[in-house]
Image (cartoon, rainbow, N blue to C red):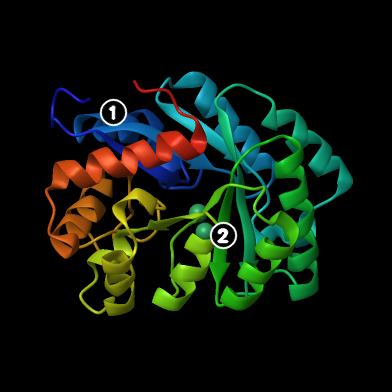
Amino acid sequence: MNVFSGLDLIDSHVHLDIPPLAGDQPGAISRAEKAGVCQIITIGIDLASSKRNVELAKQFSQVYAAVGIHPHDAKGASNEAYKELLELAGIPNVVAWGEIGLDFVKEYSPRDIQRKVFCQQIQMARRVDLPVIIHDRDAHVETVEILRKEAAGTLRGVMHCFSGDVKLAKKVLDLGFFISVTGVVTFPKAEVVKEVVRYVPLERLLIETDSPFLSPVPYRGKPNEPARVVHVAEEIARIKEVPLEEVARCTSANARDLFRLPVP
Ligand SMILES: [Zn+2]
Ligand SMILES: [Zn+2]
């Protein structure tokens, strides 16, 4: 538990290697620590980014890494990249495969390639026994279908930056997955996400900043950083009418369970 704030928070999804965060990693990590963020998971989006994040996890004891290829970068996937990712997956403090999934909003990679690369990475995560971090934008039905088909109860994971409704949340919970929410939940018009938070039991929720993106209220429009995950926890506490400490304790226990993190 952090001596400064008395809280025990985990930011389960950060991109420490993306600017402007990339330019101030030690500063962002120490401000997070002061804000009660005891552990941070920094997420890969392609092979180069996965390598950078693994290096950070070696350098900072409270930082853990996820390796994988984001749907935006699916067109860059290759057998050589997979081989290197599988090697990275075996390094201590690499705790998840991600982020992987489908993004039908931006479509930087063609949909059929996104599907293929998503399925291939699910199989690799199973092979190395790592949980998966799923990115799904406007591809709800297909994402759940693929997870059901490819993983069928043998894979653990989290649907990050959850953007679906309660109906989708139920399907994701039925798969045994966790649901993670970002600072979007603090936006006044984010009624659907607030409704999802009301519905999902605290035992199945994770919190994240997705920094440097998606700054919560009152920092909207500015670059985000892990210290601000407390605003996500506060909004969940308000919605669920439970103490902030309980949200912190529970979401951290969930993250430690899913990613097999030690208690600091
Ligand atoms: Zn994402
Ligand atoms: Zn992300």
How dense is the environment of label 1, judged by Cα within 10 Å: few (below 14), some, or many (20 and up)? some
Per the image, the residue denoted by label 1 is: 30
Quadrant in which the N terminus is drawn? top left
Outermost residue toward the right?
A: 79
Q: Is residue 262 left or right of residue 127?
A: left
Residue 76 coordinates in the image, percent (x, y): 78, 56
Per the image, the residue denoted by label 2 is: 175
How dense is the environment of label 2, judged by Cα within 10 Å: few (below 14), some, or many (20 and up)? some
Residue 220 coordinates in the image, percent (x, y): 25, 64
Residue 238 coordinates in the image, percent (x, y): 13, 60
Q: How many marks?
A: 2
Query: Residue 245 lies in what quarter of the image?
Result: top left
Residue ID at (24%, 42%):
248
Classify 75 as above or below 31. below
Classify 227 as above or below 108. above
Quadrant in which the C terminus is drawn? top left
Residue 206 appears in view: no
SS class of the residue under badge 1?
A: helix
Say which of 32 and 245 sits in front: 245
Classify 136 as above or below 176. below
- Which is more foreground, mark 1 or mark 2? 2
Q: Is mark 2 within 8 Å of ligand 1?
A: no
What amino acid is labelled 1 in the image?
Ser
Residue ID at (76%, 44%):
124
SS class of the residue under badge 2?
A: loop
